Amino acid sequence: MSLRRKIADSKRVNRAVESFFAGYIRFAQRTSRWEAEGFEAMDAVLAQGEPVIFSVWHQRLVMAPFMFNQDLGKFCSLTSSARAGRLVGKVLGRFGFATIPMSSHKRHVALSREVLRHIGEGYSIGIAVDGPRGPARQASTVPIVWARSTGKRVFVLSWSANRALTFPSWDRIMLPVPFSRGVLMCREWNETVPRKADAETVETLRLNLQSALDTITDDSDRRTGRL
């Protein structure tokens, strides 16, 4: 085994990396000025004991711990089973989130059953709808399938900051810079998902959800001067 692989597989190294990223995100959040907009509707649903489906672009995933009020309910996020995805899952775990790893070896039916079981247990489910490998800003039908199966309400979310690090990854993932000015945004996706939606209807809804996510993401960037 190569030295690089040994380092990458080291539990001690991975714990240190997880700790660093979790600490950095907390520090950036605490030292920056954040405005929260549009969370009243989602919080009201959660306060009634109803889980929701939480949708975000992969690029904006890192601030998920501050876009969900865990005093109002339990939260579970889907993460990739690849090394980077496991890291994200571990970081989210440090904020108290449960995670469900996705895998190319796990059938979609099996994954959906696991998700539906969590929803039945009262967990809200969060998903980066263009993950785990993209293409960036191209929504999957997954949240629509879950909404059709459960009748749960779907919310689209985003964040932005006037100063942020953007990494050269497929999703151009962003991290806020400490002492910035930022915004967290939430809106309900108000489309009705029929229980017996055909393929054409599902595709129309997918494009609508994709447009809603693009709109809230661009609006958050405008609020912070990034657009």
Image: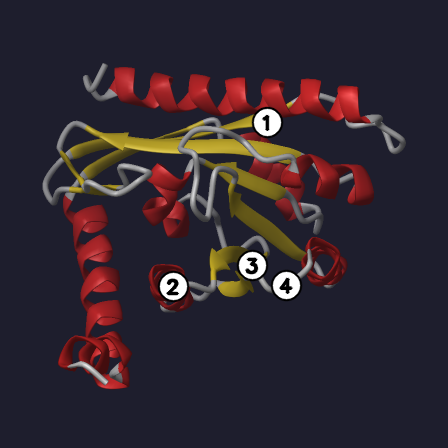
Callout 2 touching callout 4 (CB < 8 Å): no
Callout 3 touching callout 2 (CB < 8 Å): no
Q: Earlier in the sequence, mark 4 or mark 1?
A: 4
Which circle, 3 or 2, is nearer the viewer?
3
Residue beneath label 4, please? 106
As rendered, which of 5 and 225 lies closer to the eye? Answer: 5
Distance CA(mark 3)–CA(mark 2):
26 Å
Residue beneath label 2, please? 95
Quadrant location of residue 75? bottom right
Callout 4 touching callout 1 (CB < 8 Å): no
Tell me the crowding category of disc 3: few under 14, some 14 to 19, or many 20 or more residues within 10 angstroms, Cα based.
Answer: few
Callout 4 touching callout 3 (CB < 8 Å): yes
Callout 1 touching callout 3 (CB < 8 Å): no
Identify which amino acid the numbered label 4 is placed on.
Lys
Tell me the crowding category of disc 1: few under 14, some 14 to 19, or many 20 or more residues within 10 angstroms, Cα based.
Answer: some
**Element under disc 2:** loop
Distance CA(mark 1)–CA(mark 2):
24 Å
Identify which amino acid the numbered label 2 is placed on.
Phe
Which circle, 2 or 4, is nearer the viewer?
4
Q: Residue at x 19, y 17 (%)?
A: 225
Residue 62 vs 16, above or below: the answer is above
Which circle, 1 or 3, is nearer the viewer?
3
Distance CA(mark 2)–CA(mark 4):
26 Å
Residue at the left extreme, as displayed: 179
Identify which amino acid the numbered label 3 is placed on.
Ser
Residue 140 in picture, x, y percent from top left: 58, 35
Residue 12 vs 165, above or below: the answer is below
Q: Is residue 103 left or right of residue 52?
A: left
Identify which amino acid the numbered label 1 is placed on.
Glu
Residue beneath label 1, please? 188
Q: Quadrant of the C terminus?
A: top left
